[in-house]
């Protein structure tokens, strides 16, 4: 790697990068840093929801973002997405409703790096060329042996080597430590629909600042650049396949810019009052996050049912005692006894179901450093 990796600079609290009115704010709980519009009213951290954002310096490259995907899902469409997401949970926390999720929804852009590079070096690989082999196979059919032709596709591997003087553009590289988890939360994006960055297209959304600097991200970028070089060299060799590609090269004129991806963040409070973060892909509407049932609500309903069962069983006992004086009450007492026993058994369901449901939840969750 050469020395052309862009240095990061410190943007002070009062500075606005890229000719915007955005200023840097940080979260003291999850340690994320955001660029926030100067007129932004709700300063709760949009990702951990555990603390208020406060002005602080941010470390950025001075290159403005190169591309962004616009929000295609509008806030007016979020209610139906949230309602469908919530409706599968039977005993929900009182805070877990489509209306509350919609009211707390905030638009956020998160980043990937785009890396350009000039590459000069020597490469070698095994190039694979497709060819076909025809053979005959004897099969027994119709009381006789018949010869049937078969065609088999094979790959011929040949060594290839050469020199490369290539420019590669827009290799997408993670800009966040939690990039993989974030992709699980948002689902895939139609990256080919991106537009050239224009500050007016931010529409007041927060921008999450990359926490991997270009120098830190290069260890992730280099194998991705080499993979792209392998494709280019394979195509130049006229081959259809390649393996064991290796290159010894200098990477010069590295150019790093950001690719902004849209999402909505919202949350609800669980039984312990902890925020559970829900993420919606701002382009596709894909939604992810933990859907927890409420044990407290289940136990409350179980307690009510147990009380009702106890009352019914008490009347059943009275009916059975009165049967010694007035026999017909024995039938009523027996019926009430069976009913009370059934209600008592039913009380177990809301007490046990939330715990079983919550153990099955395997949705990806927003990463926080203090969790």
Image: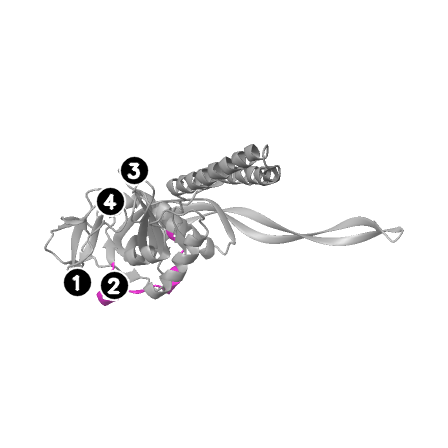
Question: In the image, which is nearer the foreground, mark 4 or mark 2?
Answer: 4
CA separation, marks 1 and 2?
10 Å
Q: Nearer the viewer, residue 142 or 254?
A: 142
User: Which label lies toward us, 1 or 4?
Assistant: 4
Check disc 4 and report the residue beneath it: 50
Q: Is residue 132 magenta?
A: no
Per the image, label 3 sits on a secondary structure element best described as loop
In three-dimensional space, the C-alpha distance between marks 4 and 2, rounded to whole angstroms, equals 25 Å
C-alpha span from label 1 to label 3: 33 Å
Q: Earlier in the sequence, mark 1 or mark 2?
A: 1
Using the numbered discs, state the Cα–Cα distance from disc 3 to disc 4 in whole angstroms.
11 Å
- Give the mark nearer the N terminus: 1 vs 4: 1
Q: Residue furthest right?
A: 143
- Which residues are drawn in magenta? 186-205
What residue is shown with label 3? Answer: 371
Q: Secondary structure at mark 1?
A: loop
Asked if one can make out residue 17 in the rendered structure from this viewpoint, the answer is yes
**Mark 1 or mark 3: which is in front?**
3
How far apart, in angstroms, are the residues tagged by discs 3 and 2?
30 Å
Q: Residue at x 87, y 53 (%)?
A: 142
Examine the structure image and report whether residue 193 is included in the region drawn in magenta: yes
> Horizontally, is 38 left or right of 241 in the view?
left
Q: Which mark is residue 20?
A: 1
Which of the pair 125/90 is nearer the observer? 90
The percent coordinates of residue 110 (x first, y second) are 29, 54
Mark before the other along the chain sequence, 3 or 2: 2
Residue at image mark 2: 202
Q: Residues within 10 Å of mark 3 (few under 14, many from 20)?
A: few
Outermost residue, left side: 14
């Amino acid at each position: 790697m050469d020395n052309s990796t862009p240095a990061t600079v410190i943007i002070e609290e009062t500075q606005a990068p890229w000719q915007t009115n955005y200023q840097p704010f940080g979260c003291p709980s999850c340690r994320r840093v955001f660029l926030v519009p100067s007129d932004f009213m709700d300063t709760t951290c949009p990702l951990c929801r555990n603390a208020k954002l406060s002005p602080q310096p941010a470390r950025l490259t001075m290159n403005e973002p190169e591309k962004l995907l616009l929000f295609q899902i509008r806030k007016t469409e979020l209610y139906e997405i949230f309602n469908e997401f919530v409706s599968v949970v039977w005993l929900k926390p009182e805070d877990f409703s489509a209306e509350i999720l919609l009211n707390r929804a905030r638009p956020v852009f998160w980043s990937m790096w785009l890396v350009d590079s000039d590459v000069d070096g020597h490469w070698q690989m095994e190039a694979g060329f497709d060819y076909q082999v025809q053979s005959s196979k004897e099969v027994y059919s119709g009381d006789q042996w018949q010869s049937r032709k078969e065609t088999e596709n094979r790959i011929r591997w040949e060594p290839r080597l050469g020199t490369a003087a290539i420019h590669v553009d827009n290799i997408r590289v993670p800009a966040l430590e939690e990039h993989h988890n974030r992709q699980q939360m948002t689902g895939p994006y139609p990256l080919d629909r991106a537009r050239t960055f224009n500050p007016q297209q931010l529409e007041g959304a927060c921008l999450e600042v990359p926490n991997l600097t270009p120098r830190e991200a290069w260890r992730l970028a280099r194998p991705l650049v080499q993979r792209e070089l392998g494709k280019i060299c394979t195509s130049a060799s006229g081959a259809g396949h390649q393996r064991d590609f290796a290159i010894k090269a200098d990477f010069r004129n590295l150019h790093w810019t950001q690719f902004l991806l849209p999402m909505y963040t919202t949350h609800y409070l669980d039984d312990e009052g902890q925020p559970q973060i829900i993420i919606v892909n701002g382009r596709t509407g894909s939604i992810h996050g933990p859907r927890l049932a409420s044990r407290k609500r289940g136990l409350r309903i179980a307690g009510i049912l147990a009380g009702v069962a106890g009352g019914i069983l008490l009347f059943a006992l009275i009916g059975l005692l009165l049967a010694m004086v007035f026999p017909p009450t024995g039938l009523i007492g027996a019926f009430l006894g069976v009913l009370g026993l059934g209600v008592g058994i039913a009380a177990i369901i809301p007490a046990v179901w939330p715990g079983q449901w919550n153990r099955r939840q395997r949705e990806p969750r927003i990463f926080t450093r203090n969790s």
